[in-house]
Image: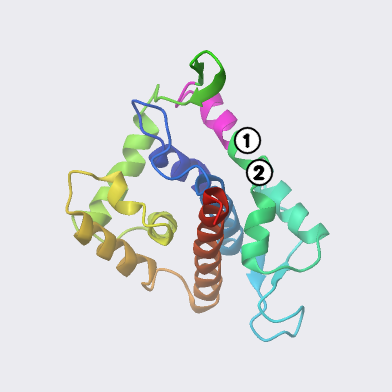
Amino acid sequence: MLLAEDLLLVLLDDESGKAIVDGSALPRVLAGAVLLELALSGTVAPDTDGTVVRKGRLVVRRDPAPADPVLADAARRLADANPMKPAAAIEKLTKGLQDTLLERIVHRGWVREDRGRILGLFPTRRWPAVDESHERGVRAELRAALVDGLTPSPRTAALISLLSAVSAAPKIFPDADKRVVKQRAKEIADGEWAGAAVRRAVDAVNAAMIAAVTAGAVAASGG
C-alpha cells in the first residue's frame, strides 16, 4: 500500500465521498506523498551541497526502479526531466495522479465512484466508502499517535508529516481537541523518526508541499 493511497482514504469523507481538503490542495498533497515515499526509499534526494546537480535540486536514482507502478512512473518522469526543486517535482507529479490513485482504491474495493450532475448540467464525482476495514486500521494508528499520545511507527509518522504539512490532521478527528491534535502532528512531523539524510529529504518535501499547496490555492482563487 502506498502512503498516497492511505492519505487519500483518510482525506475522503466516508459518507459524502468528498475530499475534506480544498480541491486545489488534494492533488498536490498526493503528489507530495509519492515524492516523500520515493525519498524514504532513497530513490530521490535533494542535493544539499551541489556536488551532483545544482544545490537544492533532486538527484534521482534510476536503479533499482521502484516495484510499485505509480512510484516507478514518478521516478522515471523525474529522472527524464532536468534536475528540479522539490516544489517543481510535486507540480510535475500531479498530472493524472489523483485519478490513478482513485482508480486503485476503487479497484481494491475500498470506495466506489458515484457520478452525478448539479442542476442537471455540471458533472460531479464522489467516492463514498464501501469497505472501511483497511482505513479503520490506518485511522487507529493515527489516533493512537495524535490523540492517545503513543509513539507512531515510521510509516505512520510519515503519514502524519504529510497531514501536518497541510494542517489536515485536526480534520481527521473532529471529536478531538483540534489545537492539541495540530500541535501533536507538528511534534511528530519534526521528530526523530527518520535518519539524518532522510530527515533532510522529508523536510524538503514537506516544505515544498506547503509552498505548492499555497500557490495552488492562490491560483484557484484568482489572486
Image coordinates for residue 94, horizontal then vertical, percent: 64, 48
**Which callout, 1 or 2, points at the residue further toward the start of the chain?**
2
Q: Are marks 1 and 2 in contact (CB under 8 Å)?
A: yes
- The amino acid pointed to by label 2 is Val
Apparent side of residue 185 relative to residue 71 in the rendered image (left or right): left
Residue 189 versus residue 200 in the image, above or below? above
The magenta segment: 101-112
Question: Crowding at label 1, few (<14), some or many (≥20) Cα neighbours within 10 Å?
Answer: few
Residue 44, visible in the rendered structure: yes
Image coordinates for residue 118, horizontal then vertical, percent: 48, 19
Q: CA distance from mark 1 to mark 2?
A: 8 Å
Classify the position of the C terminus by image quarter. bottom right
Q: Secondary structure at mark 1?
A: helix
For residue 140, what is the image quadrant?
A: top left
Q: Residue at x 71, y 55 (%)?
A: 75
Residue 51 versus residue 5 in the image, above or below? below
For residue 128, what is the image quadrant?
A: top left
Mark 1 or 2: in front is 1
- The amino acid pointed to by label 1 is Thr
Q: Secondary structure at mark 2?
A: helix
Apparent side of residue 23 relative to residue 15 in the rendered image (left or right): right
Residue 43, visible in the rendered structure: no
Where is mark 1, residue-wise? 100
Image coordinates for residue 125, horizontal then vertical, percent: 52, 24
Image coordinates for residue 218, horizontal then vertical, percent: 53, 56
Question: Crowding at label 2, few (<14), some or many (≥20) Cα neighbours within 10 Å?
Answer: some
Q: Is residue 145 magenta?
A: no
Q: Which mark is residue 70?
A: 2
